[in-house]
Amino acid sequence: MIKRTIEISSEPAHVALRNDQIQLSRGKDIVGTIPCEDLGILVVDHPQTTFSACALARIAELGGVVVLCDRAHLPTATLLPNTRHTELVWRLADQVDASLPHKKRLWQQIVSAKIHAQAALIDEKSKAFRKLKSLATVVKSGDSGAAESQAARIYWANWLTSHLPPESPLAELPGTEPDYDKPYLAPRIPIDTSRTTTYDDEPEHFLPDIGETIGTAGQSLTQGELWATARAFRRDPDSSELNAFLNYGYAIVRAITARALVGAGLNPAFGIQHSNRGNPFCLADDLMEPLRPLVDRRVRQLWCEEGRRTLDPRTKAVLLGTLTETVRYDGENGPLMVVMSRYVNSFLRCLSGKDQKILVPRMVD
């Protein structure tokens, strides 16, 4: 069954439990109820929202997740249920006892799946698509050849413009030119002289300052504005604007990945690649990597086609829709939230040595 996602953002509410129903109220008015067992994720993005302890306890008891957002409206904390799996100790032992070579082979599969998913968002006729597909087939154990980093350089430079004709017949494949990963700082000179020799083939379009909003809100980007956005964009988890859309979507996918891990009797803190000692969701960060392009596709549509420029409730609702998006898994289609448990169980079988290949959800057109 597809669990429901509830977001509290536009107005404050009190979250309480009554007759095994989650009840949302404002003052004396009840504005909504939902059966506890139907709630998958509760996203709280209003600072005046209040809770009863029994409501939070019941949500966690039935496997629900509560996500709290900060002042920037980005998820900052996640309340996960304690694991009550019948094989909890054995599965935690599988995590702890996994050898380094085994974890490297699993990471190899995840990176390859991520690059394939990134390529799915790139025009099949472009050089970037062919390069990404090539990289996906040569990922080494533990990604010792840094295929993920190479793919990221190409992907982020082309994810908005791969369907457009090249700006110059002699132009290098974006994302492979020297120093691409270093942010470009537009010179503080008059706009009519701010062109660079690299991008001087379209005199009517200029490279804006990093962070400057490109295009008009509510309108799709023109071809020139797409190129300008692609030139200025650098993936930054701490940035705003377009990056804020990505960060919000990733945080939601991270939450349901952690939820599925806990439900399977695994500890989200024990990763196979991510290992920051202050990160309680290392394994969730590992497994969500091939799912990031699901968010990227929605963000591209929101920003470039619909002209959304603010992370408002309508925009967040579209990003939350990633959880119910239909994906392809093991020859069948199903909502991501439902497929997640099957994906985690596939990883678990590989971790314990029962299977050799992780089955990863894939995007569908």
Image (cartoon, helix red, strand yellow):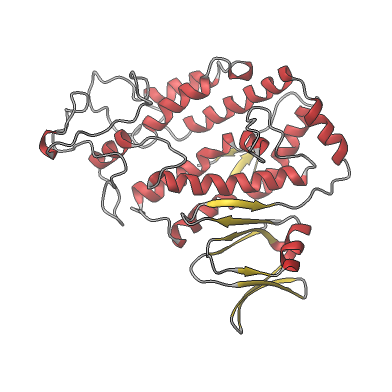
Query: For residue 222, which quarter of the picture?
Result: top left
> Residue 308, relative to residue 348: is it above or below?
below
On screen, residue 322 versus residue 233, left or right, reads right
Q: Which residue is drawn at 28% across and 45% down?
A: 212
The spot of residue 14 in percent (x, y) is 62, 73
Query: For residue 193, which quarter of the picture?
Result: top left
Regarding residue 265, the answer to whether it shows in the image is: yes
Q: Residue at x 43, y 37 (%)?
A: 236
On screen, residue 72 versus residue 286, left or right, reads left
Query: For residue 262, which quarter of the picture?
Result: top right
Total numbered circles: 0
The spot of residue 73 in percent (x, y) is 48, 56
Residue lying furthest front in this view? 278
Which image quadrant: the N terminus?
Answer: bottom right
The spot of residue 72 in percent (x, y) is 46, 54
The spot of residue 250 in percent (x, y) is 54, 44
> Residue 31, relative to residue 120: is it above or below?
below
On screen, residue 190 versus residue 42, left or right, reads left
The foreground one among 184 and 224 is: 184
On screen, residue 202 versus residue 325, left or right, reads left
Regarding residue 331, the answer to whether it shows in the image is: no
The foreground one among 7 and 278 is: 278
Residue lying furthest bottom in this view? 28
Q: Which residue is drawn at 49% across and 18% down?
A: 134
